[in-house]
Amino acid sequence: MITFSDLGLSPDVLKGIEALGFASPTPIQEKVIPVVLGSDRDVIGLAQTGTGKTAAFGLPVIERCDPSKKFVQAVVLSPTRELCIQIAGDLRNFSKFIPSLKIATVYGGASILVQINELKQGAHIIVATPGRLLDLLKRKAAHIDAVSTVILDEADEMLNMGFKDDLDSILSRVPVERRTLLFSATMSEEVRRISREYLTNPQEVTVGHQNAGAENIRHLYYLVHAKDRYAALKRVADVNPDIYGMVFCRTRMETKEIADKLIKDGYNADAIHGDLSQAQREFVMKRFRERNIQMLVATDVAARGIDVNDITHVINYNLPEEIEVYTHRSGRTGRAGKTGVAISLVNYREKNRIPEIERMLRRKVERVSVPGGEEICRKQLFHLIDKMENVALDEEQIAPFMDSVNKKLEWLSKEEVIKRFVSLEFNRFLQYYKDAPDLNDISHRDAGFSSGEPGGRRGKKGRSERPSDRFEDNRGRSRTKDIKYQRFFMNLGRKDGINPSNIIGIINDNAKDRDIRIGAIEVKDSFSFFEVEDRFAGKVMDSVNDIPYRGRLVQIDYASDQGPGAAAKKKKPKKKY
């Protein structure tokens, strides 16, 4: 078995590793560390989340830094403040026995003045988010003109979050002859593009298949209707009494809604999303790490940098827009040789995406039935019995009360005591699932569209609707009576990875109003059109324009009603909010 000492690391670095309790390198560390130490080539490292990528680049970077030189020698860029904090913490632990090596951490959401003072005291390695580092460079508070190594960690996420321009600006300020190390869990086309642009003749190191899932994770999906998704989520929790998992949603609003519902229904849950302050986030994460929270509901962006062991389940409340993100999510479980389960709640419109995930994972995603009431009650009952069997008894503490307890219960037989004990905890499950519907039964439901309208009928394309509310206009578009729509032009299309769901998500996330009614959506190769209820048009115009989306700025404008392409000449509608 190869040990860290076989990789050419110095005694001080090896002491830091030993103090952390690491015995042998992971596959990505075993492959990358000798390459970084033994040559000056650029490197692309591909491995799943939780495989030790931070040590793979961190240990050799620490090794090659010279603490006697009083300038920044390496920069690590990561997409989120959470990942930034985690990487810096790991680097400090690795260099525990090199006290003269200074590591600075800079990220948004914290005092820039504190970070400026930290940089003034000197730093050999800066760990940063792109936006905050660029801000400090513009203020001339950070100096990276002598940097010899740049690490791009989670490069795909930095691109997805719109950091391409920031990366361009930062990398234009470091020496051309620098070395660049790029690490990612996926090798998307965007990552390929950034490697061609920023790396020179890189050596590619891959652990496992590109974009593949860990072998010890079981991948399952439930096929449910959109309106049954939350009920299915509760059944996942109920059939797994010891669940310690993460639930992924697409938007901040949905994250908050689902967490609030779970808490209201008595589950140990909480949410983590971009609207939380750093202090709030740290409080939630502390509770999750201590297992006071069983289910953490999160967006993909907010979950970046979360490094928690022993997660049993990852639940995709929605499938991610980008299939590659599935591997990021599922990689949260099944770590350190343990098994895990990735469950997706898939509605009927999404089921054709399962084969895409299977091709990416190179393995089967198994369809299973949503558990019914009888199965859940059986699991809960035996979980309760197991807890009772394994409870620790403190004979000395309980002894003074036993005479009174025995006297109180002497009128009950042993069988009656057991029945009452079980019922005390178990009755709520029996009652809740007594008449619970079979969520696998589609005979009385629509084929994938949630109506929210009792007594509705099946309309075109399976939508449930009230016949008096809808009609077709002179262009064949389905309309709702008494509702006027404003048509918008958007500068993004299919080649930018845009689809109708993306457009709806962009509007909901940025306008922050779930009551906005969205009409017809047309997606072309290089641009799109969408309709919004007229009274919200001004709000959408103000909130959606100039937001970043995958490295581009979203631009929208009012479109004429004469067909695609023509800009509206009419005045902007008055804001009515």
Image (cartoon, rainbow, N blue to C red):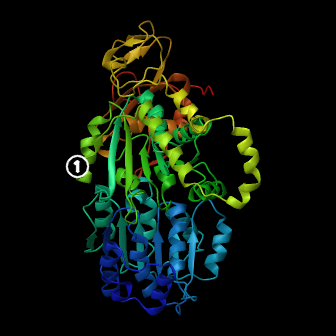
Q: In the picture, which quadrant includes the N terminus? A: bottom left
Q: How far across and down, in percent of the image, does residue 412 sit? A: 65, 35
Q: How far across and down, in percent of the image, does residue 340 sit? A: 39, 54
Query: Is 206 rendered above or below residue 428?
Result: below
Nearer to me, 491 or 513: 513
Q: Residue at x 33, y 65 (%)?
A: 47
Can residue 572 be seen in this snapshot?
A: no
Q: Residue furthest top?
A: 468
Q: In the picture, which quadrant includes the C terminus? A: top right
Q: Residue at x 48, y 50 (%)?
A: 245
Nearer to me, 534 or 208: 208
Q: Residues within 10 Å of mark 1 (few under 14, many from 20)?
A: few
Q: How far across and down, in percent of the image, does residue 364 sit? A: 24, 47
Residue 544 horizontal side relative to residue 576, left or right = left
Task: Provide the residue designation for mark 1.
Answer: 359
Can residue 249 be seen in this snapshot?
A: yes
Query: Is 8 rendered above or below residue 113?
Result: below
Q: Residue at x 36, y 32 (%)?
A: 347
Within the image, what quadrant is residue 164 found in? bottom left
Residue type at tag 1? Arg
Q: How far across and down, in percent of the image, does residue 457 sit? A: 39, 11
Residue 225 horizontal side relative to residue 284, left or right = left
Nearer to me, 428 or 64: 428
How many marks can you see?
1
Mark 1: secondary structure: helix
Nearer to me, 17 or 381: 381
Within the image, what quadrant is residue 8 found in? bottom left
